[in-house]
Amino acid sequence: MNSASFNSQRPGATHRLLSILLLVVGLLLAAGLCVAAPAPPDNPVPNIFVPRSTPANMIDHLSLFVLLITALIFVTVFTLLVYVLVKFRAKNSDPSHEPAQVYGSTQIELAWTVIPTLIVVVLFLASARVIHAIQDAAKPPSAIDVVAVGHQFWWEFRYPSLGVVTANELHIPVSDPTHPTPTYLKLLSADTDHSFWIPQLNGKTDLIPNRVNEMWLDPHQTGLFLGQCAQYCGTQHAKMLLRVYVDTPQSFSAWVQAQKPPANLDASVAAGRHVFETTACINCHAVAGTPANGRFGPDLTHLMSRATLASGAAENTRENLRLWIQDPDALKPGSLMPSMKLTDNDLDALVNYLETLR
């Protein structure tokens, strides 16, 4: 390569270097904004950098520690790379000159063997410490037990000691550090692999058929926390959403008491109840106090106490409820709920009945 052709290519290399620098600066600024962003009261956007429970705090601290170490590695390597590019670049005065070639260096080989080994050991020990602290934490007597079952594509929550069954919206009490009330979840799957993830309350834990996994939450702040199934489980994986309501102890007790009674048997909607009990609805859904005892779909005993339908796919309004029964694919394409093909009169009667289930 002659000197003229070499010089014509140098501006391109400079531009690439500047582009890399701008990209790095942009990534650092974006990370800084994520870390510094305050959490809104109802946490509408899950943010792993704004932990609100003990396990999430531990994961956050570990993540920042790993990020710091990897950032130092990146800066060191990038600095050495820039130094080499500048120090040993070809000179215009003698384009054919090569720097001294070094073959074998005990010091360098020891450095790139010992230092990475130490880094890996440190990261391993830090990760093992956090995993042990979370998975082997002692369960206090005041803990709330919940069985969470993943279905395609919705969540079932059972409170064995409280006699409550609900779906898609998990209610748990806030945990005061002076009087801890953590919630311990037993995670099961009814069909395929799922993953339970509330970013601000804990890390991901998989739900695997024929296996029992566990996790615990001890939120320090009341409010709504959003999550997601984090394991691809089929067509509607992306709309298998999680809503966790962290209540005050008084609000949680009131919610439990409201969920215990059987369904309201309102005589004014007897026609809708008849439609429900004489169609395929009772094969999939349960309503306490009625012959309906299905287990393939969500328990509907207190359907209208929930804010959403179809595992968070739509707001729980009369219009959406009617559309969900009439044409489930309109709200959640690929869901396993069949279209009931009811007449308009039967559909309106059924919706009227379901609206009394509070």
Image (cartoon, rainbow, N blue to C red):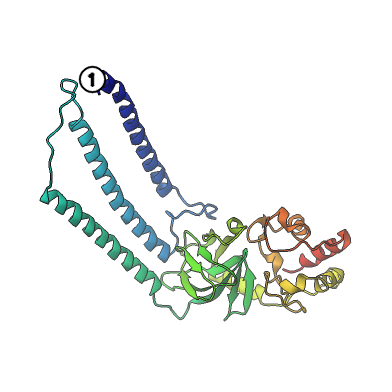
62 vs 104, left or right, is right
Which residue is most to the front? 1
Image coords of residue 248 (percent x, y): 54, 67
315 vs 243, left or right, is right
Q: The N terminus is located in which quarter? A: top left
The secondary structure type at the circle numbered 1 is: helix
Task: Identify the residue at horizontal 81%, vertical 74% (top origin).
Answer: 277
Question: Which of the 4 image quadrants contains residue 344?
Answer: bottom right
Residue carrying label 1: 3
Taking the image as drawn, is residue 182 in sight?
no
Task: Identify the residue at horizontal 49%, vertical 67% (top origin).
Answer: 206
37 vs 25, left or right, is right
* Crowd band around label 1 with a 10 angstrom C-alpha radius: few (<14), some (14–19), many (20+): some
Task: Identify the residue at horizontal 24%, vertical 36% (top origin).
Answer: 82
Near-viewer residue (277 or 341) = 341
315 vs 233, left or right, is right
Near-viewer residue (238 or 148) = 238
